[in-house]
Image (cartoon, rainbow, N blue to C red):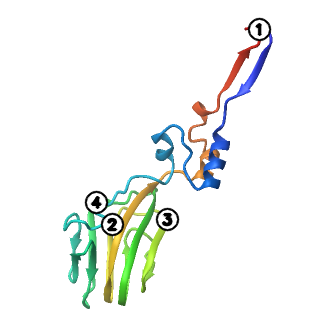
Amino acid sequence: MANEIYNTSWWGTALDTARTAGTNPDFFGSQFKLLTSEQDNLVRNGNFATDSDWTLGSGWSYGDGKVTKSGTDLSYLTQSSLTSVVGKTYRVKASITNVTTGNVRIDNFTSGTVYTSDTEVDVTFTATTANVFRFLGWNGFDGSIDNVSVQLVRCDLDQIEAKKCLADWIHTTALKDLNN
């Protein structure tokens, strides 16, 4: 009986193809989604479609699918239902627009980068403390926030093989009986 060994591992090829094409490889359905940073949004009502899920401090208001702050008061825009977990990595995205004065930052959840003009926030960090997710507007911040998302980051495309997230059941070897 002659046997031919086939390495049925195509994981690396699928990742390289996905990285080049800028897409996720189409295998194992939701399993790949669970491994990558493309997690569900942990923020409720991040597009501000309704007047709910956020605690508005002084000067913050809902309107036109976003929240806007005007006024000189230092105050928070808070999502109390979302608290960071120490040691977990998160990706935070938000649109900060219509800024005319003052400062805003993502407070007690990231390193506290200060934003003073219109920008698309896209930061990744590992939590060192357990804190509620909130924005802090001060120094007369006058501007709007929209499209807020916070995602748990598990593995990056480039980290999957190195971390062997699924190595035990993806890399297999098959034998083919050449006599049959």
Q: Position of residue 65 (x, y in %)?
A: 27, 71
Q: Using the image as rendered, state which of residue 118 and residue 155 is in the foreground.
A: 118
Q: Using the image as rendered, state which of residue 40 and residue 81 is in the foreground.
A: 40
N-term mark: 4 or 3: 4
Residues tagged 4 and 2 counted as in contact (Cβ below 8 A)? no
For the residues labelled 4 and 2, the Cα–Cα distance comes to: 11 Å
**As shown in the figure, which amino acid type bears the numbered disc 2?**
Phe
- Is 103 rendered above or below residue 153? below
The circle drawn on residue 86 is none
Q: Which circle, 2 or 1, is nearer the viewer?
A: 1
N-term mark: 1 or 3: 3
Query: Is residue 78 rendered to the left or right of residue 152?
Result: left
Q: Which circle, 4 or 3, is nearer the viewer?
A: 4
**As shown in the figure, which amino acid type bears the numbered disc 4?**
Arg
State the residue at coordinates (72%, 8%): 180
The circle drawn on residue 179 is 1
> Which residue is identified by label 4?
44
Q: Position of residue 79 (x, y in %)?
A: 27, 65
- Is 139 rendered above or below residue 126? below
The circle drawn on residue 124 is 3
Query: Is residue 96 rendered to the left or right of residue 33?
Result: left
> Which residue is identified by label 2?
133
Q: Tag 2, which secondary structure?
A: strand
**As shown in the figure, which amino acid type bears the numbered disc 1?**
Asn
Residues tagged 2 and 3 counted as in contact (Cβ below 8 A)? no
State the residue at coordinates (42%, 58%): 151
